[in-house]
Image: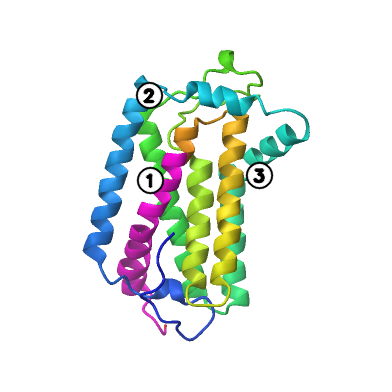
């Protein structure tokens, strides 16, 4: 998760996400390098699905209550619900925290981390796990590309943006634990449903960890700072 140690708490609720990045060049380079490496890895995995058997192993657990829960998780954070969740959280931050600039910053970090991952997915075009090899294939069959997992990128980006908000507060460690659990639940749900390979979700977590700091830099330090300066 992104480090908050460089930023001292600033006045006002949920304002730590607005603290400027100290090393913008390094932040951008890391994000681009990791994104490129993950795309290359995606092409390799597309031709060599080394985790097909692992995907089958996890899918064997898709029975009874566990199967119902994992499928519900997959539906609950689909693209439309994810957008709704982000909008609701943005409004809550703006109203409860009385800081609409921080609220807009939160939404931007989530969006700019999440949306580019779809471009990587379109570029790589890795097929989903082979349903014919699965004990409990997901229905309806998911026909879009598999790598990276948009669901996992979203939840990881959401958690990271929330941690930016809470950096330097007494709630940070609690949010970190909850966030790790949420990401783990989503990742396991997706591999148990076998809508994604295990490597899809792992790559998605790495993507969010590397890209979210750059997304915050671009959205908050460069765009918001220009068009919505602090204090206005």
* Colour mapping: rainbow
Q: Residue 112 placed where, x, y %?
A: 40, 54
Residue bearing mark 2: 46
Q: Residue 125, located in which quarter of the rendered image?
A: top left
Q: Residue 59, located in which quarter of the rendered image?
A: top right
Residue appearing at x 31%, y 73% in the figure: 226
Q: Is label 1 in a helix, a strand or a loop?
A: helix
Q: Residue 17 placed where, x, y %?
A: 44, 71
Residue appearing at x 36%, y 58% in the figure: 215
Magenta highlight on residue 1:
no
Q: 228 or 160, which is in the foreground?
A: 160
Residue 116, disc: 1
Cα–Cα gap, marks 1 and 3: 21 Å
Residue appearing at x 30%, y 67% in the figure: 222
Cα–Cα gap, marks 1 and 2: 19 Å
Residue appearing at x 40%, y 66% in the figure: 3
Quadrant of the snapshot with the C terminus? bottom left
Bounds of the magenta span?
202-231
Specify few, some or many for label 2: CA neighbours under 10 Å numbering under 14, 14-19, or 20 or more.
some
Q: Residue 47, located in which quarter of the rendered image?
A: top left
Answer yes or no: is residue 92 visible: yes
Magenta highlight on residue 227:
yes
Answer yes or no: is residue 80 visible: no
């Amino acid at each position: 998760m992104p480090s908050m140690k460089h930023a001292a708490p600033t006045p006002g609720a949920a304002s730590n996400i607005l603290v400027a990045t100290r090393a913008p060049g390094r932040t951008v380079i890391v994000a681009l390098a990791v994104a490129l490496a993950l795309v290359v890895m995606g092409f390799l995995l597309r031709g060599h699905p080394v985790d097909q058997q692992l995907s089958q192993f996890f899918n064997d657990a898709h029975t009874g209550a566990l199967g119902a829960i994992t499928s519900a998780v997959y539906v609950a954070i689909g693209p439309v619900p994810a957008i709704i969740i982000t909008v609701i959280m943005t409004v809550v931050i703006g109203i409860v925290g009385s800081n609409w600039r921080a609220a807009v910053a939160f939404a931007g970090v989530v969006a700019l981390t999440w949306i580019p991952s779809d471009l990587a997915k379109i570029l790589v075009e890795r097929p989903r796990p082979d349903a014919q090899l699965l004990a409990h294939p997901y229905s309806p069959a998911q026909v879009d590309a598999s790598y990276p997992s948009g669901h996992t990128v979203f939840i990881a980006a959401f958690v990271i943006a929330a941690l930016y908000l809470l950096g330097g507060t007494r709630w940070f460690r609690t949010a970190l634990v909850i966030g790790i659990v949420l990401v783990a639940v989503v990742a396991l749900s997706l591999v148990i449903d076998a809508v994604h390979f295990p490597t899809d979700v792992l790559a998605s977590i790495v993507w969010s960890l590397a890209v979210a700091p750059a997304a915050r830099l671009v959205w908050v330090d460069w765009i918001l700072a220009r068009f919505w300066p602090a204090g206005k």
